Image (cartoon, rainbow, N blue to C red):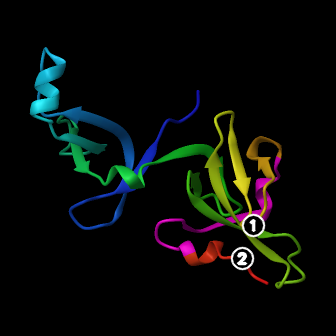
């Protein structure tokens, strides 16, 4: 069974949190007109399980996140065992003997599968057919957008 996991930036301190995604509205109306007159706030959360004390039930803690930063886990890991999420930037070590032979690629969902997209290229390659041992997570498109700038 695949691991279903998400991450997002916690509104409280701007740090990344991993867990289960949950979205909820503050209330529900019966009629469409009520929604148009009184738009209701929607909240986006990452839920995590927290151990309490020996023998007691665990708690579920929720962190409200910025929904624009929500990223899904791809089910793959990089050469160091780090989980790879949507919008992560991977550094491709094409030749370990030649450090300047390095590219950066962004992880994206294209509607059919997880792909790697190089800046300035139209083509995408599917992660399912890629040797992930050459890749290392070096950041993400929210915190490190400069990694995706084309080098000339």
Q: Residue at x 56, y 51 (%)?
A: 86
Question: Could you tell whether 122 is left or right of 148 in the image?
Answer: right
User: Dot 2, crowdedness within 10 Å: few (<14), some or many (≥20)?
Assistant: few
Q: Is residue 24 magenta?
A: no
In front of the other: 2 or 11: 11
Kindly indicate whether the residue at mark 1 contacts the one at mark 2 (C-beta within 8 angstroms): yes
Question: Could you tell whether 62 is left or right of 71 in the image?
Answer: left
Q: Give the x, y percent position of residue 43.
A: 22, 42
Location of residue 96 with respect to 4 vertically, above or below = below
Q: Give the x, y percent position of residue 21.
A: 36, 39
**Helix, strand, or loop for circle 2?**
loop
Between the residue at mark 2 and the residue at mark 1, the CA separation in whole angstroms equals 7 Å
In front of the other: 31 or 118: 31
In the rendering, which numbered label is found on residue 150? 2
Q: How many marks?
A: 2
Q: Give the x, y percent position of residue 116.
A: 72, 54
Q: State which quadrant residue 46 falls in.
A: top left
- Quadrant of the snapshot with the N terminus: top right
Q: Which residues are magenta?
A: 130-145
The answer to whether any part of residue 48 appears in the image is no
């Amino acid at each position: 069974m695949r691991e279903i996991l998400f991450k997002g930036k916690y509104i409280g301190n701007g740090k990344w949190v991993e867990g289960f995604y949950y979205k909820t509205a503050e209330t529900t109306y019966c009629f469409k007109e009520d929604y148009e007159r009184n738009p209701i706030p929607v909240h986006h959360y990452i839920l995590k399980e927290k151990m309490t004390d020996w023998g007691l039930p665990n708690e579920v803690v929720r962190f409200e996140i910025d929904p624009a930063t929500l990223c899904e886990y791809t089910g793959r890991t990089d050469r160091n065992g780090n989980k790879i999420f949507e919008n992560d930037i991977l550094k491709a070590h094409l030749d370990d003997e030649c450090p300047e032979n390095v590219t950066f690629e962004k992880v994206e969902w294209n509607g059919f599968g997880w792909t790697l997209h190089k800046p300035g290229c139209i083509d995408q390659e599917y992660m399912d057919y890629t040797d992930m041992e050459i890749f290392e997570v070096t950041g993400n498109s929210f915190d490190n957008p400069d990694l995706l700038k084309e080098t000339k």
